[in-house]
Amino acid sequence: MNTGVLVIGVNGLIGSSLAELAQRDGIDWIGTSRKAKADANAIKELDLLNDDQIRNLSFRPKITYLCAAETNIRKCQSNPEATGKINIEQTVKLAKHLHQAGSAIVFLSSNLVFDGNHPHVRPDQMTAPQTEYGRQKAETEKILLGELKHIAVVRLTKVVHQDFALFKEWLSALSQRRTIRPFSDMPFCPIQLSVVAEELWVLSRDFAPGIFQLSGDADLSYASAAQFLAQCRGIDHELVKPQTTAEAGFSQYFPRHTTLLHRPIRTGQEPMPVFTTLERIFGSLQR
């Protein structure tokens, strides 16, 4: 079956956003989901752990977006064998199958392929993951870049949106004049879901192989983000009581830096300032 765009994991945040862009532009598309709805003509069932389903895929898309993965960092850490089978073995198997059918492949990766010791990491810097999730992403990157010709790896920092659970929890608590205790020493680099989707969508029109990195302009602590939320919504910032990870007894690894050297798909696109991203999100955030 010939189609323009195939979205693996269409029910996820990025996958569903790509499907919306395909519909907006009138592009033929098919999405896959492990739990496909029977009445959704454009969405087909695909379980990454089912080898028969992968082998029997008859799609011949122009481009495939690999958006399905096990992204729970704690789950990857506690069960590396099962999550690695999904994130490495089966993802590679699917990518090779579709590439052989003539499809360009877009693989979504993460800043966690690096150790986080330095900000604004270059795309060509050697990977040095410190988490199992990051290791799995780095290993899959290596295999795909080494074996496929038409492959684009797109590394992302923290993707946020108006339904981002942590932000909604903060707003709900602050609106009820309850204090929140965000970490003052844990950084993140927020990028907006809609911006990420639009950038990825460029590849559907003008595919280019290689490594791309979508990042905001700076690291930001979660405490600073929470204080900015209070400011944006006119809430007493004294309700934001920052704490360190040590004070909270948090022992899980987290990087000291999360930014990437921005290498966009569209030449000349500058990284979005993180406070601009948050202002857009916080303005439309619902409790």
Image (cartoon, rainbow, N blue to C red):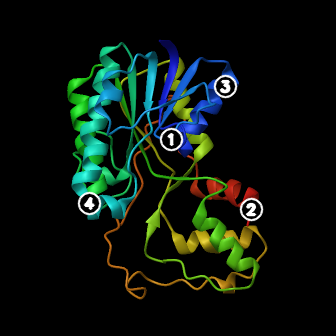
Please name which of the two marks, 1 or 3, marks the residue nearer to the observer: 1
Q: CA distance from mark 3 to mark 2?
A: 26 Å
Q: CA distance from mark 3 to mark 4?
A: 37 Å
Residue furthest to the front in view is 38
Q: Earlier in the sequence, mark 2 or mark 4?
A: 4
> Closer to us: mark 2 or mark 1?
1
Q: Residue at x 56, y 22 (%)?
A: 29
Q: From the top left corner, tell me how far across and down residue 262 is, in percent.
A: 44, 43
Question: In this picture, is 250 found above or below 165?
Answer: below
Return the mark for residue 164: none
Report x, y in % for residue 105. Answer: 38, 25
Q: Which mark is residue 286?
A: 2
Q: Which residue is under mark 3?
A: 23
Assess disc 1: are there few (<14), some (14-19) or many (≥20) residues with their C-alpha within 10 Å of its C-alpha: few
For marks 3 and 4, the one nearer the N-term is: 3
Q: Amino acid at mark 1?
A: Lys
Q: Which residue is mark 1?
A: 35
Q: Are marks 3 and 2 in contact (CB under 8 Å)?
A: no
> In front: mark 4 or mark 1?
1
| Residue 229 at least partly seen | yes
Disc 1/disc 3 C-alpha distance (Å): 21 Å
User: Looking at numbered disc 3 in the image, what kind of residue is underneath it?
Assistant: Gln
Instruction: Say few, some or many: other residues with alpha carbon within 10 Å of mark 2 (under 14 / 14 to 19 / 20 or more).
Output: some
Q: Amino acid at mark 2?
A: Gln
Residue 79's disc number = 4
Describe residue 277's horizontal placement relative to residue 235 as left or right.
left
Look at 28% across and 19% down and name the residue there. 149
Image coordinates of residue 171 in percent, x first then y, are 69, 71
Which residue is depicted at the point 35% across and 66% down?
256
Lower sequence index among marks 4 and 1: 1
Secondary structure beneath disc 3?
A: helix
- The mark tally for this picture is 4
